[in-house]
Image: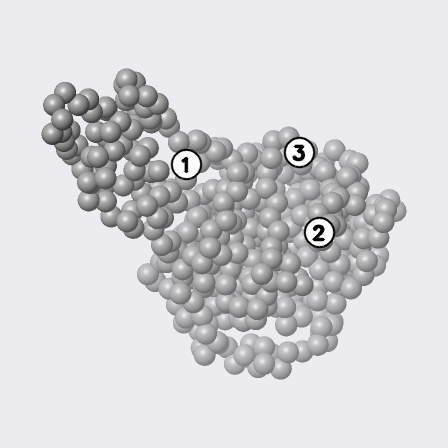
Amino acid sequence: MDLLSAAYGGATSDEEDDEPPSSPPVATALTSFAPPPVKRPRWEYQPYLPPPSSFPQPPLQAKAAPPPTSSASGRYVSKRECALLAASRAPVDAASHLPPQTTAEVDSSVGSITDSNLRADILHSLRCQPKPGSSKSLPSKLSVSLNGHTKAINCIAWSPTHAHLLTSAGMDHTVHVWNVWDKGNTTARVLKHHTAAVKDVRWSPHSLSLLSGGLDCSVQLIDVVEGKVIKVFKEDQAVEVIKFNPSNPNLFLSDTTRSNISENTIIVWDVLRQVPLSNQVYTEAFTCPCVRYHPHEASFVVQSNGNYIAIFSSRPPFKLNKYMRFEGHGVWGFPIKCNFSLNGRELASGSSDGSIYFFDYKSARLLWKIEAFKEACTDVVYHPIIPNVIASCSWAGEISIFE
């Protein structure tokens, strides 16, 4: 059919003249942030044009052959038959009909992803795997600084299977993999497979592969060892959040931005039945850049642009706790995220003032504050094995590890 379409040039009858093909559809990415403060850099979302490699290449065209002569004099040869004969004789490469194999562009100055060159104390802690809650001290000392992103970092994540590795997703269209405590090169991978800002990245629960999504309307599964794109999942809108199914790592969920859905809506879903259990559990007029489920209790928290973190029950009817909230930090339109400690006793949050705030989960009392960055701290995550280690990132493209 591609050959026929290319040969006919869109004609619907023998007498119609050829018309130029119409332009490809253009998808535009819609922002999900509130109006930014003065110090926040502004950018313009440009209409996204899918890269040429994501579409089949057009077949090679050959010069149209003259109409064949017929032994029967006076036989009429239509324009459609001429085009069909010319296309059938063209030396077309069969591979040109298929999308080329996609490979993530990897920076040449990459390091190792192994743990063979780690600090001795870190290697010992990773192999001993202390129990969650075994350390009562909160992170306070800057241990490692990681630099490589040229724009803001949206999120970071520790690898659950190779806990010396950290990944980050940035507005500079890249995903970085860091060998955090390597005594040589801490930059393990720089993946450039997205064509727009990357909003979220997650490690596979059981392998060295990443799932990333962003404003290029795609979710991409990446083999970190080989630096290759395993699979591309196209969406019709920008991808804001992705998450693996904890019961089946072959399944994942993605949240896309749509113009007809209010950003301050929180919906609780039954994933198996694919039906909402509650259409709206948050009634305040603030956007919510982050939702986190408690690791041990039947509750979840929601980061609000009202500059507080709200608490909800995870049992129907999913009521908001009106008597307690975590506050003192700032959000102010930034994609500020929060995360629980391994034992669930503390809740850490980034802040628009560049600090990290540590709260007691039971009382919502502020326990500790670290002045980490000069610009907004957008994410903070606890290490999956070492309880007193956290990673944080900033709107200026910096990453800091505290112990």
Label 3: state its secondary structure: loop
Residue at point 56%, 35% (across, down): 31
Q: Residues within 10 Å of mark 1 (few under 14, many from 20)?
A: few
Tell me if I can see residue 153 in this picture: no
- The residue that mark 3 highlights is 261
Location of residue 108 in the rendering, given as x and y in whole percent from the top left corner: 33, 61
The image quadrant where one finds the C terminus is bottom right
| Amino acid type of the residue that numbered disc 3 sits on in the rendered structure | Ile
Look at label 2 and name its amino acid.
Val
Q: Nearer the viewer, residue 18 or 150?
A: 18
Q: CA distance from mark 1 to mark 2?
A: 32 Å
Q: Secondary structure at mark 1?
A: loop
Is 163 in front, or is 208?
A: 208
Residue located beneath label 1 in the image: 49
Q: Residues within 10 Å of mark 2 (few under 14, many from 20)?
A: few
Q: Is residue 332 above or below residue 101?
A: above
> Which of marks 2 and 1 precedes in the sequence?
1
- Of labels 1 and 2, the one closer to you: 2
Q: Quarter-wise, where is residue 297 in the image?
A: bottom right
Q: Residue at x 69, y 42 (%)?
A: 288
Between label 2 and label 3, give the one nearer the viewer: 2
Please give the residue where the numbered disc 2 appears in the rendered image: 271
Q: What secondary structure is found at the residue carrying circle 2?
A: loop
Which residue occupies the foreground of this view, 326 or 67?
67
Q: Amino acid at mark 1?
A: Leu
> How many numbered marks, from 0 up?
3
